[in-house]
Amino acid sequence: MTSSPSLQSDLPDDRLGHFIVAALALLGQRGFTTDADQIAPWLTDWRGRFTGRTLGLASPASTDEVAAIVRLCAAHGVPIVPQGGNSGMSGGATPDNSGTAIVLSLRRMNAIRALDRSARTVTCEAGVVLQVLHEAAERENLRFPLSLGGKGSATVGGLISTNAGGTQVLRHGSMRALTLGVEAVLPDGSVLNQLVPLKKDNRGFDLKQLLIGSEGTLGIVTAAALKLEPAVAARAVLWAGLDSLPQARGLLLHAEALAGQALEGFEVLPRHSLEAVLDYLPGARRPIGGDHAWHALIELVADADAADRLPELAERVLVGALEQGLIADATIASSEAQAEAFWALRENIAPAERAIGPAVQHDISVPVALMPDFVEQTAPEIEAAWPGTKAVGFGHLGDGNIHYHVLAPAGVDAASWQAGDGKAISRMVHDLVTQWGGSISAEHGIGQLKRDELARLGDPVALALLRAVKNALDPQGLLNPGKLI
Ligand SMILES: Cc1cc2nc3c(=O)[nH]c(=O)nc-3n(C[C@H](O)[C@H](O)[C@H](O)COP(=O)(O)OP(=O)(O)OC[C@H]3O[C@@H](n4cnc5c(N)ncnc54)[C@H](O)[C@@H]3O)c2cc1C
């Protein structure tokens, strides 16, 4: 066991020592460490905006071990920061700077407990990575219909705790819609087991829904029962160039009318985001020629019965859109590899934008019909108020959810810009979103990034309810302190 300045704690030495000895006795060397090198990768969030300190990293291997370490923490008054793949966008899995909390990683709990092909359900532990879940479902000719750019890292527990969305919400909903049951360790160490999926169950509040989206502040998700869908027999991935965002909304309505349930995803990218990915991603290619202000990525899917008709449907969507003047140019991926390449352009926007330089990111939603006007009106307002910045919106137009990034002027110092102008810009964006009746967190959660903004802009009645629930479940305030509320 070693320690380093980054791991030192503000707790008195004797209390700290007792806790560490007891945690090691409980979980063994694999399950608990204070080794600085092992812990370091987990102390900074994915965007690199928050770095904390910790008393130690707990990596329990079972629900019983999670319950035991939670009870130990409760007895010693040690706060707990639950962590999955650490791919979250709001700093929710990063401990604060006091060094008094442990990070509780669920990554060792990565077993798929059961996959029921006929019921189309999977029961898996919280540490199962989304990509692994996709592959397990595919082996049974099924699919888990939620995908996002961080799928190689994001875990089931993290997805549930942030109520993650992604690129298929349009048809299948977010994690709330896909989670049938949850097993969780509560702040006192008791285990809530609601894993058996029941289609009808009216025994009071839906407690699993309380945990979904609670960002590790109410309980530690240890396992979940999730809904699967039949594998698609065919998909058509379309790429279109457009002149404006209102045209993209028109294209969405047109595609919905023609394709109905076959429409699985509808994403938009501005010129700036596409160029950023083309620069960033080795081998990335422009799907269509010409210089378009906006691009739309559309996915249509079909089961075996309708697979033969899918290419014709895709053609009709594009031809109709061309005839109505909604799009300037378009193409349909001619192979699965090309379809993947189109999606890679979308999924690499976040890292590509990150590589360009400092930015402040906002994951916002407004009513779907208002989104084009929101972006077209507010982007120039922000750029005028903060000369040299660039406001870029991309993402899930079909859900009224845009990732709205404001890039810093060239040459600024990242840290001081983010703490100064960046913060002021975020306030402006959040004020605008609130004026437009929207949400300052559509799918990434509040974490520590937006906690103060939620307190500033949230409805006081809703905030009081959130706090009442938190106090009822976690009176000691040990689960993920400083996050969400
Ligand atoms: C490139 C990229 C693209 C992304 N795209 C999207 C997107 O389109 N849509 C979207 O919604 N998200 C997206 N994300 C964000 C991220 O992948 C999700 O927020 C994901 O749900 C986080 O999962 P995780 O396991 O990494 O959780 P972490 O980052 O480890 O934790 C996130 C939060 O959940 C809590 N938590 C984690 N595990 C548990 C648990 N078992 N029990 C209780 N609390 C827990 C943490 O305390 C923290 O508050 C993207 C991320 C990346 C890197």
Image (cartoon, grey):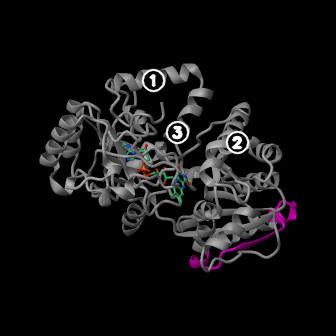
- Residue 232 coordinates in the image, percent (x, y): 51, 65
Seen in the image, is 373 located left or right of residue 131?
right
Please report the residue visible at 32 percent of the width from the left and 55 percent of the height from the top. Answer: 39
Q: What segment is highlighted magenta in the picture?
A: 320-338
**Secondary structure of the residue carrying numbered label 2:** helix
> How far apart are the two marked residues, 2 and 3, measured between alpha carbons?
17 Å
Reply above or below: 263 against 97.
below
Mark 2 touching mark 3, by CB under 8 A?
no
Q: How crowded is mark 1: few (under 14 residues within 10 Å), some or many (20 or more)?
A: few
What residue is shown with label 1?
467
Please report the residue visible at 34 percent of the width from the left and 48 percent of the height from the top. Answer: 225
**Secondary structure of the residue carrying numbered label 1:** helix
Reply above or below: 349 against 61.
below
- Mark 2: amino acid: Ile
From the image, state whether disc 1 or disc 2 is nearer to you.
Answer: 2
What residue is shown with label 3?
446
What residue is shown with label 2?
425
- Mark 3: amino acid: Ile
Seen in the image, is 406 located left or right of residue 122?
right
